[in-house]
């Protein structure tokens, strides 16, 4: 393990620690590491702090005071008039509460040289991940999971976390693949002081305000989106935008073209050997032509997936399921692009159809719910295509956390089939339910619907959508810009009167700058045609790789039973493609980091 993806922010905080060993290991990560080095060498039994910041840091900045206090942000402050030095002074004067007034995307690490307190803060949306592990004499943290493995934390696999990953497609915070490493949830802070470590959820709430009518919401949305786009402009002309055929990215592009002297190039991913609706190049090209913007397609085919899989896993930094549709960012960087706008975020402004259906089901009379549940269970032997969703919908609900739980996204019976110990499914399901309910209990919202939206932001958005968007861009040494993750926009979208959603308002704003067809184009899932490819050119490579999984996985999963899933998929008897991707990327991750 001589190298991993260069970390963005790494540090050690504690009462002891071999700094020379840390520096030696950091040197093995590449010649450009340790670009900034903070160290507190005080002859005192009280807490000391050390932080090393590495390469691949286009948006990283820091501030320092003569007494040794410092602040580093792996991301950006969202109010340009605020200086990071002001945030540092606020932290020194008022403690962690001072950061509630600063809107930012990313991870903040701050050290108070006087009180000897250290704080880690993950922004409310979870744009930047934060991992930490308790080590001898202190706590080690990083915005890169692989870096902690590289620096020698205990590599014992967490079987329950692995089951939850296979069930949901991602590792929901606080879980990671390894028992010894914890992921800080979005909107949480971790304070390390001489008397111990304390976690707080101060930043995860969104203020409930007076409801706004649709007409006012359109004007407000237009103005706030313009402000968000302008203040996130990276300051140079090497800027790109990921343009799908939908209204979210199209409206961002329209806004940028109306900003004076702000040239931008648009890029769309195209899947080779595939002619279905998942290819959005035609719609994207029409939008770019309408707005007078240079447009280019980046091709991805089955051979590219095979050739690039390890680099994609390394860039993502965790095993992953979805996001493959946009992993190939290197060709964009090769064209001189240093910052990329993404339209991610607006889809999370309202409830998904599945959660809307679940809340309606949950509001039915108990007798009706019981009757429907009995019908679904009676149909289980028929193995209907909709059985998984139906079982999830009709599960008994003990709280809003259970209402959110996507545990049955992949049927529990199928998971039991591939495990050496089928009881792992029950342990994983209970742990997942506890995580979701604990997150729901943190909220102070007025309705289950609002709590569900916030849970979706905390888990699905932060630990899937943002993780892959950030991983692909940072891995290609570009900055990621996310205007829809703006506090004012999100507050507006969550306080619109009636059944109108923020996405509805966004379409009405889009109609001012785009054709009616463009502004009201149907939502197309942004995903790769993996199901077809795994029934074709990827079938044998998947079979070969999953028959030889690393021991970290074979202690939990039976490879021969996974082979049966491949057979079922290839023969068209079931669609297991994305769970096979999940198993495959996990195999690559464990091979890479736990040889």
Image: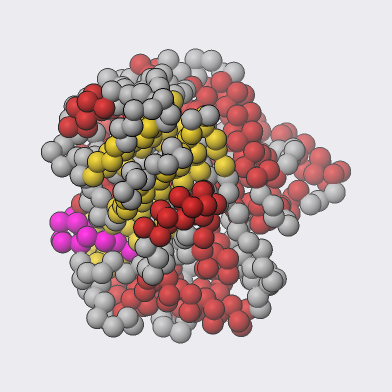
Task: Name the residue rendered at 85%, 44% in the picture.
Answer: 366
Task: Name the residue rendered at 68%, 72% in the picture.
Answer: 211
In-image side of 18 versus 432 (left or right): left
Task: Name the residue rendered at 36%, 49% in the picture.
Answer: 71
In-image side of 473 versus 124 (left or right): left
The quadrant in which the N terminus is found is top left
Please state the horizontal and vertical placement of residue 199, each as a whole percent of the image: 55, 38
Task: Name the residue rendered at 62%, 42% in the picture.
Answer: 439
- Say which of 55 and 137 sits in front: 137
* Magenta highlight on residue 341: yes
The quadrant in which the C terminus is found is top left
Tag count in the figure?
Answer: 0
Please state the horizontal and vertical placement of residue 70, each as a whole percent of the image: 35, 47
In-image side of 227 versus 540 (left or right): right
Please state the horizontal and vertical placement of residue 119, each as a whole percent of the image: 45, 42
- Say which of 120 and 319 sits in front: 120
Answer yes or no: is residue 470 visible: no
Q: Is residue 549 above or below residue 526?
A: above
Please state the horizontal and vertical placement of residue 165, each as a whole percent of the image: 48, 33
* Magenta highlight on residue 508: no
Answer yes or no: is residue 430 visible: yes
Q: Which residues are magenta?
A: 331-342
Q: Is residue 20 above or below residue 85?
A: above
């Amino acid at each position: 393990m001589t190298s991993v993806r260069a970390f963005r922010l790494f540090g050690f905080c504690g009462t002891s620690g071999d700094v020379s060993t840390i520096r030696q290991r950091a040197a093995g990560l590449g010649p450009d590491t340790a670009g900034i080095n903070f160290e507190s060498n005080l002859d005192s039994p009280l807490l000391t702090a050390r932080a090393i910041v590495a390469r691949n840091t286009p948006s990283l900045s820091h501030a320092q005071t003569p007494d040794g206090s410092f602040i580093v942000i792996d991301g950006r402050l969202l109010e340009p008039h605020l200086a990071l030095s002001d945030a540092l002074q606020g932290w020194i004067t008022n403690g962690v509460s001072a950061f509630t007034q600063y809107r930012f995307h990313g991870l903040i690490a701050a050290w108070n040289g006087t009180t000897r307190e250290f704080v880690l803060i993950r922004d409310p949306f979870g744009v930047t991940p934060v991992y930490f592990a308790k080590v001898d004499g202190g706590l080690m943290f990083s915005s890169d999971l692989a870096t902690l493995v590289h620096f020698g934390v205990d590599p014992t696999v967490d079987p329950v976390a692995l089951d939850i990953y296979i069930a949901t497609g991602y590792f929901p915070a606080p879980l990671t693949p390894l028992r010894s490493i914890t992921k800080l949830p979005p909107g949480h802070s971790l304070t390390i002081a001489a008397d111990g470590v304390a976690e707080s959820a101060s930043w995860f709430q969104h203020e409930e305000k007076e409801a706004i009518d649709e007409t006012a919401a359109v004007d407000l949305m237009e103005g706030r989106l313009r402000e968000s786009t302008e203040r996130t402009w990276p300051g140079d002309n090497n800027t790109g935008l990921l343009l799908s055929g939908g209204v979210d990215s199209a409206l961002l592009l329209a806004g940028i073209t109306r900003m004076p002297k702000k040239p931008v190039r648009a890029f769309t991913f195209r899947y080779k050997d595939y002619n279905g609706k998942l290819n959005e190049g035609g719609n994207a090209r029409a939008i770019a032509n309408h707005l007078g913007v240079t447009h280019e397609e980046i091709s991805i085919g089955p051979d590219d997936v095979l050739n690039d899989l390890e680099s994609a896993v390394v860039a993502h930094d965790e095993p992953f399921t979805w996001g493959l549709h946009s992993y190939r960012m290197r060709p964009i960087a090769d064209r001189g692009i240093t910052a990329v706008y993404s339209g991610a975020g607006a889809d999370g402004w309202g409830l998904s159809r599945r959660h809307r259906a679940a809340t309606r089901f949950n509001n039915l009379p108990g007798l009706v719910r019981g009757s429907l549940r009995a019908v679904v269970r009676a149909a289980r032997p028929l193995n209907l295509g909709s059985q998984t969703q139906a079982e999830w919908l009709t599960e008994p609900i003990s709280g809003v956390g259970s209402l959110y739980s996507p545990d049955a996204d992949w049927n529990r019976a199928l998971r039991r089939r591939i495990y050496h110990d089928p009881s792992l499914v029950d342990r994983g399901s209970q742990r997942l339910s506890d995580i979701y309910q604990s997150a729901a209990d943190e909220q102070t919202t007025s309705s289950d619907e609002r709590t569900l939206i916030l849970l979706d932001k905390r888990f699905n958005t932060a630990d899937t959508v943002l993780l892959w968007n950030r991983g692909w861009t940072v891995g290609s040494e570009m900055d990621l810009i996310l205007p829809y993750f703006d506090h004012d926009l999100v507050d507006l979208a969550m306080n619109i009167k009636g059944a109108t959603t923020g996405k509805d308002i966004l379409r009405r704003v889009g109609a001012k700058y785009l054709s009616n067809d463009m502004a009201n184009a149907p939502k197309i899932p942004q995903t790769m045609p993996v199901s077809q490819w795994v029934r074709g050119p990827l079938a044998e490579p998947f079979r070969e790789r999953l028959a030889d999984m690393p021991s970290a996985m074979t202690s939990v999963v039976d490879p021969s039973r996974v082979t049966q899933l491949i057979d079922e998929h290839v023969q068209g008897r079931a669609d297991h493609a994305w769970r096979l991707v999940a198993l495959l990327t996990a195999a690559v991750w464990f091979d890479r980091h736990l040889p």
